[in-house]
């Protein structure tokens, strides 16, 4: 049963039903994640859920229950979902809840995503005799900024390091830069790079595209810039707004759609007003139709301060959008120069400068979009990605060469 109204603390909203039927030799896997907000880790679970739906429903346990488009999409893909709220790292009750969810899932393997899930679930799953796989989705996990947040970041990183070193059987890096940034954290735990993937998008007709643009308040002649991702410091939405303000002053047909929600929502709403952009910038909140919005836009922008291998970027490229991005994470290894441009993070003027030619030159937009679409095809082999995960679930440990060399030099750590 789906609960539309939740109390402040929910102990196991359970959509799992009975334990899975062990009708095959494949291990039973439970995916555990911090939350079901809009993000790359959540999108990967949706891709996996849709891919395996015909053979066996994906089991997912979320540590922060909330009604979100990602949650709805997972449920529509047939996921057997379990959720909890009120999780605290230092609460024995929270640890008992997580332990109960793992035990009752009947899983042989627990695949963990994001920081809180790693800190909590990896040790509990190991103590229950489960195989533990952890995916690292960012070059700098648990990152904060300033004052108490810097201390919080340090504590969370330290706890996550211990979970990765002592209670994890296999670490998965979602891109090469994520691997380079995190190899020193995992000690002797095997670490392997398995790059993020996306499902090829469904085609959107010209009529559908026009309809979406009208619904979003964009005219046929408008040039629509789109950004997807949570409104949080990592994505640096303030830098994007300031860059767009520079463009808007000279391009009356420029529009910006910012797709996502997050802790900076009020700050970004206020900044939009202060810059006089309330009629030019749409803050959509979280949406379940991101692919359709991408297909209806003209240019994609990523303003992040740090990243791993951002799925939003891959999704935009697969829609044939030209891209301007900050040079963070694995973006430079994914985005060809012919597809748009790269700029340093935290520099709105440079971001606006890179975007300007795409607003004024339709032929350049077309050529960059073609290059982006061509490059995206390297990231649509969902079946191959799933086979790699299955090998890890079966206990076939794997290491990147650099990780193996590090282990040989330094031991388990």
Image (cartoon, rainbow, N blue to C red):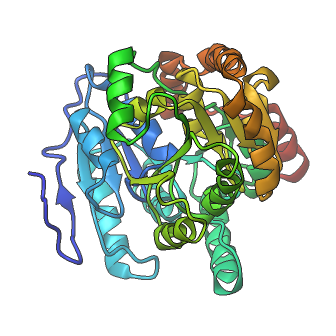
Depth check, front residue: 65 or 20: 65
Q: Extreme left residue here?
A: 1
359 left or right of 130 in image: right
373 left or right of 259 in image: right
Q: Residue at x 26, y 32 (%)?
A: 77
- Please tell me whether residue 364 is drawn above or below residue 99 in the rendered image: above
Callout count: 0
Residue 173 in view of the camera: no
Q: Quadrant of residue 316?
A: top right
- Please tell me whether residue 6 is drawn above or below residue 209 in the rendered image: below
Where residue 374 sits in the image (x, y, percent)? Answer: 65, 13
Depth check, front residue: 83 or 304: 304
Q: Residue at x 47, y 18 (%)?
A: 200
- For the C terminus, the quadrant is bottom right
Depth check, front residue: 249 or 74: 249
Q: Residue at x 34, y 64 (%)?
A: 64
Where residue 121 sits in the image (x, y, percent)? Answer: 45, 60
Depth check, front residue: 210 or 74: 210
Q: Quadrant of residue 42?
A: top left
Where residue 1 sits in the image (x, y, percent)? Answer: 8, 51
Q: Residue at x 39, y 45 (%)?
A: 31
Residue 331 in view of the camera: yes
Q: Extreme bottom residue here?
A: 148
Q: Extreme right residue here?
A: 409
Where residue 243 sits in the image (x, y, percent)? Answer: 70, 54
């Amino acid at each position: 049963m789906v609960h539309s109204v939740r109390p402040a603390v929910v102990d196991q909203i359970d959509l799992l039903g009975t334990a899975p039927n062990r009708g095959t030799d494949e291990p039973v896997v439970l995916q555990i994640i911090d939350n079901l907000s809009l993000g790359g880790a959540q999108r990967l679970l949706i891709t996996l859920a849709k891919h395996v739906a015909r053979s066996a429903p994906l089991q997912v346990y979320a540590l922060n229950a909330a009604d979100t488009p990602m949650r709805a999409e997972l449920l529509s893909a047939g996921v057997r979902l379990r959720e909890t709220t009120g999780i605290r790292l230092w609460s024995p009750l929270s640890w008992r809840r997580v332990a109960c969810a793992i035990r009752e899932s009947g899983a042989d393997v627990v695949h963990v995503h994001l920081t809180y899930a790693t800190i909590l679930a990896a040790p509990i799953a190991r103590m229950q005799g489960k195989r533990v796989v952890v995916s690292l989705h960012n070059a700098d996990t648990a990152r904060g900024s300033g004052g108490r947040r810097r201390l919080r970041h340090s504590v969370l990183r330290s706890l996550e390091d211990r979970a990765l070193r002592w209670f994890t059987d296999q670490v998965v890096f979602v891109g090469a830069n994520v691997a380079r940034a995190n190899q020193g954290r995992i000690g002797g735990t095997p670490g392997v790079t398995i790059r993020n993937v996306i499902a090829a998008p469904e085609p959107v007709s010209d009529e559908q595209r026009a309809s979406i643009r009208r619904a979003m308040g964009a005219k046929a002649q408008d040039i629509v810039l789109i950004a997807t991702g949570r409104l949080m410091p990592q994505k640096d939405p303030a830098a994007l707004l300031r860059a767009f303000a520079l463009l808007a002053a000279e391009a009356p047909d420029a529009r910006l759609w910012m797709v996502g929600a997050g802790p900076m929502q009020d700050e970004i709403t206020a900044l939009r007003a202060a810059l006089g952009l309330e009629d030019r910038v749409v803050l959509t909140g979280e949406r379940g139709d991101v692919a359709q919005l991408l297909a209806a836009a003209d240019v994609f922008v990523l303003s992040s301060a740090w990243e791993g291998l951002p799925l939003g970027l891959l999704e935009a490229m697969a829609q044939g959008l030209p891209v301007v991005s900050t040079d963070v994470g694995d973006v430079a290894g994914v985005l060809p120069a012919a597809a748009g441009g790269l700029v340093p993070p935290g520099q709105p003027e440079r971001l606006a400068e890179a975007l300007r030619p795409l607003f004024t030159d339709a032929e350049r937009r077309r050529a960059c979009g073609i290059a982006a679409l061509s490059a995206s095809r390297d990231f649509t082999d969902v079946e191959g990605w799933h086979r790699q995960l299955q090998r890890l679930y079966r206990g076939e440990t794997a290491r990147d060469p650099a990780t193996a060399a590090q282990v040989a030099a330094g031991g388990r750590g």
